[in-house]
Image: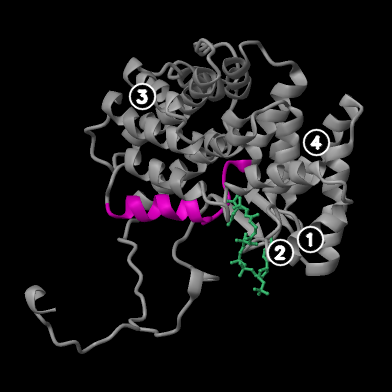
């Protein structure tokens, strides 16, 4: 047994996976052998889900069947909607509301009592959870804004249907395609903290309805998925001052704060997803005739790279992309869930196929010899 301490499990190999590979020095990301750039430009989120869950890209017939089966699962039972309504009325945080709603889905899932490792049941459960997350989130957002909940439509794509339920109107092609691309880009990323959380939970042979809420909790933190919301709040903070972007970042660093959207445990160079989202953010700015958010971002990127050698991660440019799409800032991280749930499910399926309880050790640094004194005598 090695006594070497690997804080944060940095660089530790704990599993074999055929799902995604990251080359942190080259800035390369692949899902099952396919370059992220090719998938982002050519595949829909539904195709990527099929790829992650079934091991290959679907042909037309497989795709249609998969898409239709998933779209038919979008409706969410009244019990969950009642909970979401209550949580929205109580001003519950969006990530917490989503986590609770997803957890409650098990009460209505016909496969809830299946063996937790049953692959076919897990594919059905996974499809239902993935299909219902956008419905829960859009319902939450509409209730808190005092608006009627919009029922899902089966004829729209996963991405377009979400924007339709959120805004009450069909998105135009640019919005639907941009959102679909963002879902593709966020779908999987090796053993990031939330995915690892889902694996730890499933390694105890707990079920999918336990591992997904756990993963949502892990994604919510500001060092992980929560950073996309922080990035936009930081850009708005900058916009509120009369400082130049570089001056403002210097001030932020002087205060000992981290710049959200920069740095990564695996990438030593720019995250390839940030490159694609940066281009999209620029295009949206050009279309609106306002490149302010893109220009703030590029000035900050250049400065942080020169000063700290840190490159932007996926959260940096997703933020200004979503902002320019008119999406509320505090649902950026729930949107990450909407996509990453596909990766979590794929990793849980892999975990069950070759399971061993995940159980590392801590180096004990506490006292080893204390004389016990009863409560009344202390
Ligand atoms: C989808 C995602 O999860 S992507 C990541 C999203 N998170 C963020 O954007 C939050 C900001 N970034 C960070 O906090 C970090 O870069 C992480 C958590 C992503 C990676 O962390 P780690 O690999 O553990 O690196 P660690 O936290 O040890 O940082 C290494 C050094 O870089 C510095 N650093 C890392 N990121 C940043 C940052 N964003 N701003 C300022 N300094 C930073 C640290 O202060 C540290 O410096 P030090 O050695 O002088 O103390
Ligand atoms: O891989 C990580 O640690 C974080 C990340 O970029 C992701 O989860 O997409």
| Mark 2–mark 1 CB contact (< 8 Å) | yes
Q: What is the CA distance from the residue labelled 2 to the residue labelled 1?
A: 6 Å
Along the horizontal axis of the image, is 369 left or right of 222?
left
What residue is shown with label 4?
280
What residue is shown with label 1?
251
Residue 77, relative to residue 225: is it above or below?
above
Q: Position of residue 7 (x, y in %)?
A: 49, 74
In magenta, the rendered stretch is 186-204
What residue is shown with label 3?
83
Closest to the observer: 225 or 156? 225
Residue drawn at 44 percent across, 62 percent down? 15
Q: What is the CA distance from the residue labelled 3 to the residue labelled 4?
A: 36 Å
On-image quarter of the N terminus? bottom left
Q: What is the CA distance from the residue labelled 2 to the residue labelled 4?
A: 31 Å
Which image quadrant is residue 258 in?
Answer: bottom right
Mark closer to the observer (2, 4): 2
Secondary structure of the residue carrying tag 2 is loop
Q: Is residue 304 magenta?
A: no
Residue drawn at 50 percent across, 69 percent down? 8
N-term-proximal mark, 2 vs 4 = 2
Q: Position of residue 338 (x, y in %)?
A: 53, 34
Q: How many marks?
A: 4
| Mark 2–mark 3 CB contact (< 8 Å) | no
Residue 254, relative to residue 236: is it above or below?
below
Q: Position of residue 139 (x, y in %)?
A: 49, 20
Q: What is the CA distance from the residue labelled 1 to the residue labelled 3?
A: 42 Å
N-term-proximal mark, 1 vs 4 = 1
Secondary structure of the residue carrying tag 3 is helix
N-term-proximal mark, 1 vs 3 = 3
Mark closer to the observer (3, 4): 3
């Amino acid at each position: 047994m090695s006594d070497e301490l690997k804080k944060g499990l940095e660089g530790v190999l704990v599993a074999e996976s055929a799902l995604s590979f990251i080359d942190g020095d080259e800035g390369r990301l692949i899902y099952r052998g396919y370059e992220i750039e090719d998938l982002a430009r050519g595949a829909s989120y539904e195709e990527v889900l099929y790829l992650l869950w079934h091991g290959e890209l679907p042909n037309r017939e497989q795709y249609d069947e998969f898409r239709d089966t998933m779209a038919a699962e979008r409706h969410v039972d009244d019990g969950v909607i009642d909970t979401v309504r209550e949580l929205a009325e109580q001003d519950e945080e969006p990530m917490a509301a989503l986590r609770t709603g997803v957890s409650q889905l098990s009460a209505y899932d016909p496969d809830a009592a299946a063996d937790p490792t049953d692959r076919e049941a897990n594919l059905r459960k996974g499809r239902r959870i993935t299909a219902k997350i956008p419905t829960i989130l859009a319902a939450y957002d509409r209730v808190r804004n005092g608006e009627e909940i919009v029922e899902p439509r089966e004829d729209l794509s996963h991405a377009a249907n979400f924007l339709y339920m959120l805004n009450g109107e069909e998105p135009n092609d640019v919005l639907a395609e941009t959102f679909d691309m963002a879902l593709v880009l966020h779908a999987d990323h090796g053993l990031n903290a939330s995915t690892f959380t889902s694996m730890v939970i499933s390694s105890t042979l707990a079920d999918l309805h336990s591992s997904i809420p756990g993963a949502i909790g892990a994604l919510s933190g500001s060092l992980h998925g929560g950073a996309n919301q922080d990035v936009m709040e930081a850009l708005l903070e900058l916009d509120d001052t009369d400082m130049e972007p570089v001056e403002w970042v210097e001030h932020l660093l002087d205060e000992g704060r981290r710049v959200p959207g920069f740095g990564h445990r695996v990438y030593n160079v720019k995250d390839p997803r940030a490159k694609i989202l940066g281009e999209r953010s620029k295009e949206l700015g050009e279309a609106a005739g306002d490149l302010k958010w893109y220009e703030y971002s590029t000035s900050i990127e250049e400065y942080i790279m020169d000063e700290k050698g840190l490159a932007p991660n996926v959260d940096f440019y997703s933020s200004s992309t979503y902002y320019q799409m008119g999406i509320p800032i505090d649902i950026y991280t729930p949107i990450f869930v909407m996509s990453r749930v596909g990766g979590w499910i794929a990793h849980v399926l892999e975990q069950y196929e070759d399971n061993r309880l995940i159980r590392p050790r801590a180096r004990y640094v506490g006292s080893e010899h204390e004389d016990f004194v009863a409560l009344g005598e202390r």
